[in-house]
Image (cartoon, helix red, strand yellow):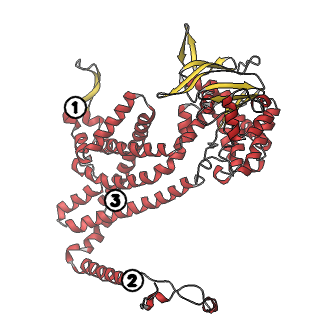
Amino acid sequence: MTDVATGPVIRAHDVHKSFGSLEVLKGIDLTVERGEVVCLLGASGSGKSTFLRCVNHLETVDRGFILVDGRLIGSDLVRGRLHEARPSVVTERRSRIGMVFQQFNLFGHMTVLENVILAPMRVKKEAREVAVERAVRLLGRVGLGNKQDSYPAHLSGGQQQRVAIARALAMEPTLMLFDEPTSALDPELVGEVLDVMRYLAASGMTMMVVTHEMGFARQVADTAVFMSEGRIVEQGPPEKVIGAPDHERTRAFLGKVL
Amino acid sequence: MSGSTDTRFHHDRVDLADLVAIADHEPVRRRAAGQKVGGAVILVLAGFVVAILVTNPGFDWPTVGRYLFDVSVLEGIAVTLELTIAAMSVGIVCGVVLAVLRQSGGPIPRFAATLYIWFFRGTPVLVQVLFWGFAASLFPRIGLGIPGGGFLVSWDTNEVIPIFAAAVLGLGFNEAAYVAEIVRGGLLSVPAGQSEAADALGLGRLATLRFVVLPQAMRAIIPPIGNQFISMLKMTSVVLVIGVGDLLESVTQIYSRNYRQIPLLIVASIWYLVMTTLLTLVQARLEKRFGRSLSRVGGAR
């Protein structure tokens, strides 16, 4: 694999997205450096989840482009125009982007271990032993070494989400996307998931996190981005954006959630 | 209600001490009033049925016994089973393809699949089987060539599509339309998040279908497919009309010689019942197997 180990991990330029007549993203520009942890904040409907999903092309971008590791993700540049990329190409490009969903989305018919080794074996064509070895190591790291033969339905939400993180890490991503990873969890289970994410951030992983956990954003994020009505209103160090925001809309939002 | 003189309503006004003092706190179970009467009526009716079966000489049980294991009957059973399995195989393979086309193909494949289902569900299977049986009169020869320009190579239709194959195609293509709907329902029953997660992991469309979506759709697909198998087993009897030699045809041929229609139809019915019973047992086991571990996908919603 040709790894571009320098330069920003994400470079989004003028990203627009509409659902029908509803314009959800109205031109997003954002750069995420290697090892940077970015938290996307904002009210529901502000477009932050949609933007996150655009980064690995789960949503197609209507206008603008997103580069991940220097490569266009959902489009190709052909003779001076952007063309939608073939599905197989998109599939290949996003295999180095890990994604963690609000609803975990573990494969319910597979054990924890099978969930984690599926993509390495089927996408990277790794030998089973290699995939299993890494999976066991990753599950140990998220504190679930003893759960590899359980089925997702028998795990708590927090455990499921930690498995989901291990599953994404098994593809050795250069970027991890988190879409409200703790929003579906009972309050007492939030901490264990945030601990794993904190650990991941400390290990130098580039992360983009949509979250309502202001404490986490303050403590872990290098950059906090506040979005409202499809635009980035304000971005900067979290102590600035959360602690002393410039914009009225940021203040109004924080006043409600803090 | 106060002032009521009906004593039936006073049993709930009790002294707590009395209540605690009674020895047994398990209430005496009520039996629904109709149960005893209904049971008696059914027993009497069952008695009548048995009496008729025994006393009416028309049932001719000795003949039933004589032909139950007759060689041509057993051969007919073999043909019926082969037909069922072959036609269901055709139906399931084509049905899955149709369902996938209808679900995720472009507008033209989707329209084609819809048209197929419209046609094959909209015409009787008996008519379809007859069509295949008479295919030779419509296309006496089939082969490769240019439309309007004659054949380069060709074969006699009756040789390429023997009557058994005609029956399999007739039943199978019809079945595919129903299987397609069942499979489509199964695919829709798998939450969208599952294929999104597979997409995000870099699994391609086919891998997602094969490893993630289809295995989970099976739980919704197996029970109705089991029903289809059972109904196919019985539906194979319509191939009688093109002379394939299935169970029903075997018995009709016997009674056309000895004129003992009723006992021979009983022979056929007994065997159909035996086969459908076995299939029901298989179906129950499969359902149990595919239901394992799938109790719930995802977390709180």
Q: Are marks 2 and 3 on the same chain?
A: yes
Q: Nearer the viewer, mark 1 or mark 2?
A: 2
Which residue position is annotated with label 3?
B74
Which residue position is annotated with label 2?
B33
Residue B13, x across and y down, in percent: 53, 88
Query: Which residue is most to the top?
Result: A79
Q: Nearer the viewer, residue A112 or A47?
A: A47
- Tell me which corner region of the image, top left, top right, bottom left or bottom right, holds residue B102: top left
Residue for point 23% across, 74% down: B60
Q: Is residue A86 visible?
A: yes
Circle 2 marks a residue in which chain?
B
Query: Which residue is most to the front?
Result: A248
Q: Nearer the viewer, mark 2 or mark 3?
A: 2
Which residue position is annotated with label 1?
B139
Q: CA distance from mark 1 to mark 2?
A: 67 Å
What amino acid is found at the position of numbered circle 1 in the picture? Answer: Phe
